[in-house]
Amino acid sequence: MSVDIQAPGPEMIIFKGIFDFDELYKTMHDWFNFRGYTFHEVKFKKKSKDTGYEIELIWCPWRKVTDFLKYRFNVHVLIFNVEKIEVIKNNQKKELMKGRMFMEVKAFLEADYSDRFEGSKLKKGIRQFIISYVLKRKIDTMWGDKLEFKQYEFLNVVKECLDMQIKGNEHADVW
């Protein structure tokens, strides 16, 4: 069983308004693919309600950092009260969505993802020693810090796609 070290968070976005779901989906998917993450869509559920559609997405993309550590994101998106509307933009009809969105992003540094230190108390103790003492400084200052800023970068890309903030990122020059 691997050990999860969670980055500060979880980070959340709460949005109400008009947005392009296809563009948002593609932007988020491309962000992970461009950075070399193996992408897993655990759940995509769309159901009809009295107040409109409800869409639920759960993603678990991951990327190996070393042979002992990997980055993993848990992205949960819930969109409800969805209505499809047509908007004319640049003399072209475009179908957008109007609704409420709740997005939660959790980032993890997963240690011993291949379960090499499973099976006995001695192996589990060695794994804990490696995490707590041998790799502690690198986890705190290098890998964990980078994961935290990647989480902020992902959320900024989503906010730009939803027009929630101006273009740019205050963390862009950090990692």
Image (spheres, rainbow, N blue to C red):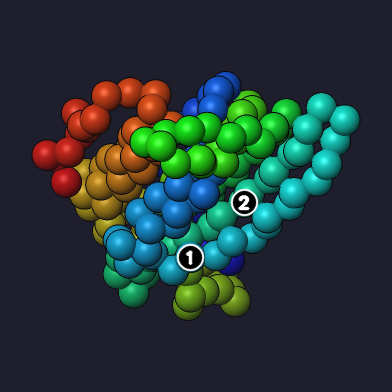
Image-based side of 100 in relation to 52, left or right: left
Quarter assignment of residue 148:
top left
Disc 2 is placed on an element classified as strand
Q: Residue furthest right?
A: 50
**Residue at position x 75%, y 49% in the image:** 46
Residue 4: x, y in percent? 49, 53
Residue 9: x, y in percent? 45, 32
Disc 1 is placed on an element classified as loop
The kind of residue tagged 2 is Ile
Residue highlighted by disc 2:
58
**Residue at position x 62%, y 51% in the image:** 58
**Residue at position x 47%, y 60% in the image:** 61
**Residue at position x 37%, y 36% in the image:** 90
Residue 63: x, y in percent? 38, 65
Q: Residue furthest front?
A: 91
The kind of residue tagged 1 is Phe
